Image (cartoon, rainbow, N blue to C red):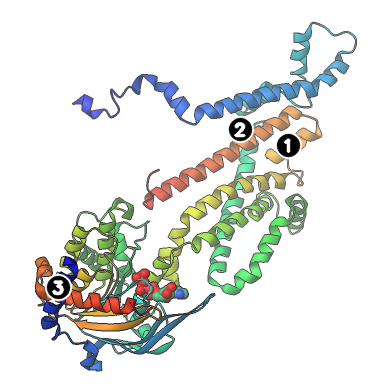
Amino acid sequence: MDRSLKLLSFSAAMNVIASPLKPADVVPRPSGASVVEARGLGLTFKTNDGPVQALTDVNLSIGKGEFVSFIGPSGCGKTTFLRVIADLERPTAGTIHVNGMTPEQAREARAYGYVFQAAALYPWRTIEHNVALPLEIMGIGKAEREERIKRTLALVNLSGFEKKFPWQLSGGMQQRASIARALAFDADLLLMDEPFGALDEIVRDHLNEQLLQLWARTNKTICFVTHSIPEAVYLSTRIVVMSPRPGRVTDVIESTLPHERPLDIRETPEFLAIAHRVREGLRAGHSYD
Amino acid sequence: MSAIAAPGAGTGLEPLGLWARLSSGRTLPVLSILLVLIAIWYVAAFSLNAPFQRRLDGESAPGGTLAFVERTLNQAKPTLPSPHQVAQNVLENTFLRKVTSNRSLVYHAGVTLSSTVLGFVLGTTLGILIAVGIVHVVTLERSLMPWIIASQTVPILAVAPMIIVVLAAVGITGLLPKALISTYLSFFPVTVGMVKGLRSPETNHLDLMHTYNASPAQTFWKLRLPASVPFLFASMKVAVAASLVGAIVGELPTGAVAGIGAKLLSGAYYSQTVDMWAALVAGSVVAALLVTLVGIASRVVERAMGARPA
Ligand SMILES: Nc1ncnc2c1ncn2[C@@H]1O[C@H](COP(=O)(O)OP(=O)(O)OP(=O)(O)O)[C@@H](O)[C@H]1O
Ligand SMILES: [Mg+2]
């Protein structure tokens, strides 16, 4: 009783604030400037149990310098979408452009850094050599390599752990090392698939803060997959809500939060309003099946 | 200070010393098995050699039962030599002869060892090359794999003389023909292990290379090869033992005058059973040595590659 009343008054308060939150695809964006541009994008996996529609009719354009979060229940195609951008999967319908090129060309131009859900560090390489891996492959000289390793490890607070092997680090430290690895070659686009999914709340808060600072400082474009509503709202300039079977975009929410975001912004009504809208979007997607 | 510095001091484990280490380690179980085996060996040696000893003694058997047992276990050409005879032969021919002497086991083991090592190196190299081919060229897997498997179903004892004779006809004799038989036996486990190892990287690790737009060569050197190292060493342990078998088998049909195989053959020819068994012991020692060496190499390399100390 009490609870539902509270909820009611809460959503009433919500409506007042919710009005400026318009779905982003109402606002057309100049396609020339967009980093990722998907039109009618679809991907169907052929499996032994028949076709699986991982993505259908995704229309999305992500501008330079945006921080876009993807949120949705398991199996709604978040990872698949990121993998399409990264040219790790080929779409079966529609078009997608990355920096105005095909994903393959963009990959060949080393346009993005990818952070997998698991840290995926090479166990036989020390932390510094793991960070050096992309630099070696891209043919960057030793002196510059060392300078960049030093800089990116400092960025993720891992200075002093250069000579350690991955198993000597905690899960959170490993994930930070894998972020350092993605940052080391300074791509303008970062694709991050639930990078903080396995971490505890405190470490997560800390890394969220650091990621925001990094983003503000470098003007990178970031695509970020998460299951956590607060995380999505705290980080993003836009939140893409997805729903499964078939995987599709059900809502795109523009954040009205300022660029400067201390952690306690998460207690403000504005923050909660956006969080509520995301939750509603997720719920709508669920009631679909 | 010193009380803190010595770890484990005062924990009550100290006074047990040697006994604790024996019973907790592998030494004690291995030793007990050895004792049991030696006992069984003595019983078998006595029962196998006794009939001949009875015939030899005829009607006039001197002494009592104990003397009979002693004579039975110390025949010059026993059906099954007793452990102390073999031990004595091994020790004499290992430590009391010049290494260049034809009777020295060290000399014979050395001959076999050199062709084993050459064959093992060739076999490992060949095995790795074939595996690299199979992993990178799809058609190679389908065309080559059946032949590779078929090659191992051919009994080596039948093939070895042919290889030796054919090679001798084209003027290749000595170390190489024997080594080639070792190669023949040792490349197979390495191929199988390396194919598995080169394919062992997780999808994540491979995808990472793809996102960097790494070339196949870069993916090979920086991912597939390091990932395959544990598989390589595991298969090398099998391969080195197979190489030794190959080298010994290769010495049998050549009428070779040196090597553990030659020693076995001449022992059989002259019914020098004690010599034969001594040669067998030498062979096992060499095998144990080789497998241990590969094990040590594997531990050194894997430690350098950041393996968690066990
Ligand atoms: N390689 C594949 N082959 C076949 N089906 C796949 C493949 N990869 C993903 N799928 C299917 O596509 C759908 C979307 O998967 P995806 O991994 O993109 O989901 P997700 O949103 O990232 O889920 P999660 O939150 O659990 O990570 C799922 O139904 C999944 O089973
Ligand atoms: Mg996923």
Residue A229 is situated, as x and y percent measured from the top left of the image, at 23, 71
Q: Chain of mark 2?
A: B
Gap in angstroms between the C-alphas marked 1 and 3: 87 Å
Q: Is residue B181 left or right of residue A45?
A: right
Q: Where A173 falls versus B84 (above or below)?
A: below
Dividing the image into 4 quarters, which one contains the C terminus of chain A? bottom left
Q: Do pointers 2 and 1 mark residues of a single chain?
A: yes
Q: Is residue A14 visible?
A: yes
Mark 2 lies on residue? B99
**In the displayed structure image, the side of residue A27 where residue A101 appears, left or right:** right
Q: Chain of mark 1?
A: B
Amino acid type, label 2 = Val
From the top left corner, tell me how far across and down residue A82 is, in percent: 33, 77
The residue located at (85%, 9%) in the rendering is B61
Q: Amino acid at mark 3?
A: Leu
Label 1 sits on residue: B264
